[in-house]
Image (cartoon, rainbow, N blue to C red):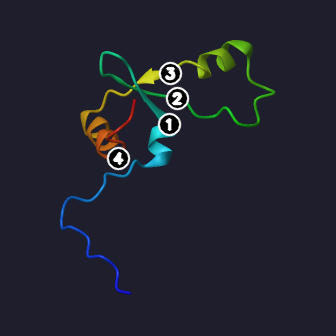
């Protein structure tokens, strides 16, 4: 039995999963990123440095923001 022919239309937008895990979108529309260097070799670092790593930073470069929004169109 032959398969049904698909209707020629737009393809689905797929979210780039690595991008959606690394970045967050705030209520006002800013793109926020997490800091790296949190996985291992943290024994020597001070408590203040480790606490600063937990903060999220805004992404300021316009081209990078544009790329992030293209990679994750449905990001919340």
Q: Which residue lies under the disc numbered 4?
A: 71
Task: State the CA–CA distance, disc 4 to disc 2.
Answer: 17 Å
Q: Is label 2 in contact with label 1 (beta carbons under 8 Å)? A: yes
Of discs 3 and 4, which sits in the foreground? 4
Q: Could you tell me residue 22's position as x and y percent?
A: 50, 36
Query: Quadrant location of the C terminus?
Result: top left
| Comes first in the chain, label 1 or label 3 | 1
Task: State the CA–CA distance, disc 4 to disc 1.
Answer: 12 Å
User: Residue lying furthest top in this view?
Assistant: 48
Task: State the CA–CA distance, disc 1 to disc 3.
Answer: 10 Å
Label 3 element class: loop
Q: Could you tell me residue 52's position as x and y percent?
A: 60, 17
Q: Is label 3 in contact with label 2 (beta carbons under 8 Å)? A: yes
| Comes first in the chain, label 2 or label 1 | 1
User: Residue lying furthest left in this view?
Assistant: 8
Badge 2 crowding class, 10 Å Cα cut-off, few under 14, some 14 to 19, many 20 or more, is: some
Does 38 appear above or below 16? above
**Residue depicted at 31% across the width and 51% down the height:** 13
Task: State the CA–CA distance, disc 2 to disc 1.
Answer: 6 Å
The disc placed on residue 22 is 1
Q: Is label 4 in contact with label 2 (beta carbons under 8 Å)? A: no
Q: Could you tell me residue 72's position as x and y percent?
A: 36, 42
Task: State the CA–CA distance, disc 3 to disc 2.
Answer: 5 Å
**Residue depicted at 34% across the width and 85% down the height:** 2
Badge 1 crowding class, 10 Å Cα cut-off, few under 14, some 14 to 19, many 20 or more, is: few
| Comes first in the chain, label 3 or label 4 | 3
The disc placed on residue 34 is 2
Label 4 element class: helix
Of discs 4 and 2, which sits in the foreground? 4
The disc placed on residue 56 is 3
Badge 4 crowding class, 10 Å Cα cut-off, few under 14, some 14 to 19, many 20 or more, is: some
Label 1 element class: helix
């Amino acid at each position: 039995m032959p398969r049904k022919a698909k209707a020629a239309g737009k393809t689905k937008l797929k979210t780039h999963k690595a991008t959606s895990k690394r970045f967050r979108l705030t209520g006002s529309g800013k793109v926020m990123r997490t800091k790296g260097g949190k996985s291992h070799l943290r024994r020597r670092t001070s408590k203040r440095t480790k606490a600063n790593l937990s903060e999220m930073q805004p992404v300021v470069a316009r081209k990078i923001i544009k790329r992030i929004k293209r990679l994750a169109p449905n990001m919340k």
